[in-house]
Amino acid sequence: MIKEPTFDNVQVLKSVRTVGMLSTVRIMSEMRQEYVTIGHSSFFDFEDATIEDITSNYKLRRVSPITFIFRSSKGNFHGICPTVKSVNQIYEDKDVIDIDDQAHNDIGFKKGRWTLRVTHKGYKPSPKLLGCVKGLGYNLRDVTFSNPHLEYLAQKHNSKEAKTLIEECKTVGDATKLVAYQTHENNHVRGA
C-alpha cells in the first residue's frame, strides 16, 4: 500500500520582494541607437563586519578612490564605489580586498554584473547611508565616475559628497534613468 505524502515537516515561507541596483554603467550609442554597457561601478557586500573593519581596511582604500558605505542589516554593510571600471579591473580589486563576501563576488562574476539591495527585504530595513571612505593616493578629479550611481546617491540619500563629485569631476553614463533597477523575488521552501 502506498502511503500519501504529508507536509508536516515542510514550512513554506512568504515570498520576499526587494529592489536591487545594478552595477552597469550605460550610454546611448549613436551608431546603434541603443544603450550599451561601458563599465561597472564596484559593489561590495561586507558580511559579519564592523564599521571599523571597513573604514580601516587599507586594501579597500588602495583600490577604491571613494566608497559609500551603507548599513544593510545588523553586522552587514554594502559599499558602492561609483567609479567606472571593467569587469577585469573589478575582479583584480576584489581579489585584493579580503572582507568582501565571496558569494556576492562569485554571482557577480558569473552574471557579468553585480546587484545590491536598495529597498527593504522582509524584516530587513532599506540600507542606510552611513558615510564614505576616501581612498589613498587618489586625486578625485582624475577619476571617471558613474553619473547614474552618483545621481542615485545624491538624490535618494542626499549625499553631499556625491553632489560635489557630480559638480567637480568627470562623469559618464546616462542619468536620465537614475539607476537601472531589478526586482528579485525569493520563494523560500524549507524541508525537514
Image (cartoon, rainbow, N blue to C red):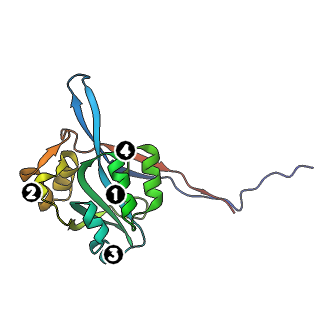
SS for dot 3: helix
- At x 33%, y 55%, the residue is 43
Identify the disc placed on residue 93: 1
Q: Is residue 121 visible?
A: yes
Q: Nearer the viewer, mark 2 or mark 1?
A: 1
Q: Quadrant of residue 112?
A: top left
Q: Quadrant of residue 59?
A: bottom left
Q: Nearer the viewer, residue 172 or 5?
A: 172
- Horizontal side of residue 34 vs 98, given as left or right: left
Q: Which residue is mark 2?
A: 164
Residue sitting at 40 percent across and 67 percent down? 98
Q: Residue at x 43, y 60 (%)?
A: 122
How crowded pointer 3 is (Cα within 10 Å; few <14, some 14-19, many 20+) is rated as few
- Mark 2 and mark 1: span between their CA atoms? 25 Å
As drawn, is 6 to the left or to the right of 96? right
Marks 2,1: beta carbons within 8 A = no
Mark nearest the camera among 3 and 4 is 3
- Does label 3 or label 4 sit earlier along the sequence? 3
In the rendered structure, which disc, 3 or 1, sits on the residue that comes first in sequence?
Answer: 3
